[in-house]
């Protein structure tokens, strides 16, 4: 069975990065978008990185345009937006798909490790209603990524320990990150 360290990601310049480079360090893997109602979470991610990177935290930012086409533009344009608007200090990877036939193999693995358990938080009802009415009335019946800014927390030993839907309060994400450190 594969481990998180068996996967690679591509940087926008085409360079391959093995997640084994992050062995022994907790990772927060997130599919992001620049034009989403959850885009302000870039600020939260930046703060997590700035507060916990020296203790080992890595943020793996994978832009994705599968949800409402909310990550338009090239990888360079997305990177420029994130650094100019939010000052994101961590590596962004190549824009990729997280569901379907063209999904990154990493995401098939992550979804197998941590299933969708529903939305929580302030915007939970909104997301539930939106997806039922506009995307798929049975969206909750599979483990696909439901929207931008879904996060997976990987501990120092490479275990996928949590899945956070975009509606989860970022304070809860921070608490889990601190536990993983």
Image (cartoon, grey):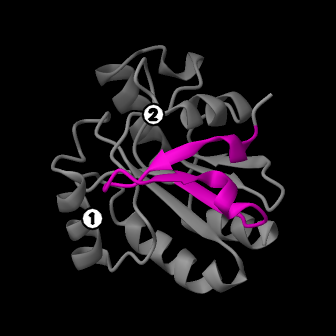
Residue at figure coordinates x 33%, y 59% from the top left: 39
Outermost right residue:
157
- The mark that comes first in sequence, 2 or 1, is 1
- For the point 71% across and 47% down, the residue is 5
Residue furthest front as drawn = 15
Image vertical order of residue 104 relative to residue 171, above or below: above
Give percent across and percent down for residue 54.
66, 85
Q: Residues within 10 Å of mark 1 (few under 14, many from 20)?
A: many
Q: CA distance from mark 2 to mark 1?
A: 19 Å
Determine contact: label 2, label 1, CB under 8 Å.
Answer: no
Tell me where residue 133 sits by quadrant: top left
SS for callout 2: loop
Q: Nearer the viewer, residue 174 or 91?
A: 91
Residue 10 is inside the magenta segment:
yes
Q: How many marks?
A: 2
Q: Quadrant of residue 68?
A: top left
Where is residue 49 drawn, in percent x and y?
Answer: 55, 77
Q: Quadrant of the N terminus?
A: top right
- Describe residue 70's horizontal placement relative to residue 25 as left or right: left
Residue 117: which numbered mark, if any? none
The residue at which mark 1 appears reads as: 79
Tell me the magenta residue range: 3-29
SS for tag 1? helix
Q: Is any atom of residue 60 visible in this view?
A: yes
Q: Position of residue 108 (x, y in %)?
A: 59, 28
Image position of 75 (left or right of 169): left
Residue 61 on image: x %, y %: 45, 57
Q: Is residue 117 visible?
A: no
Q: Which residue is mark 2?
A: 98
- Viewport quadrant of the C terminus: bottom right
Q: Is residue 75 magenta?
A: no
């Amino acid at each position: 069975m594969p481990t998180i360290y068996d996967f690679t990601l591509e940087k926008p310049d085409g360079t391959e990065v093995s997640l084994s480079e992050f062995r022994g360090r907790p990772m927060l893997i997130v599919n992001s978008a620049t034009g989403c109602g959850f885009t302000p979470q870039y600020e939260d991610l930046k703060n997590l990185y700035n507060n916990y990177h020296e203790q080992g935290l890595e943020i793996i930012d994978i832009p994705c345009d599968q949800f409402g086409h909310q990550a338009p533009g090239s990888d360079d344009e997305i990177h420029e937006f994130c650094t100019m608007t939010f000052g994101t200090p961590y590596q962004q990877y190549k824009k990729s798909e997280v569901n379907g036939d063209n999904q990154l193999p990493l995401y098939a693995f992550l979804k197998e490790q941590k299933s969708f358990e529903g939305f929580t938080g302030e915007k939970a009802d909104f997301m539930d209603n939106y997806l039922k009415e506009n995307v798929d009335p049975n969206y909750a019946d599979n483990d696909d990524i439901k929207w931008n800014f879904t996060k997976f927390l990987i501990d120092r030993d490479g275990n996928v320990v949590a899945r956070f839907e975009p509606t989860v309060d970022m304070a809860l994400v921070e608490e889990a990150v601190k536990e993983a450190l």
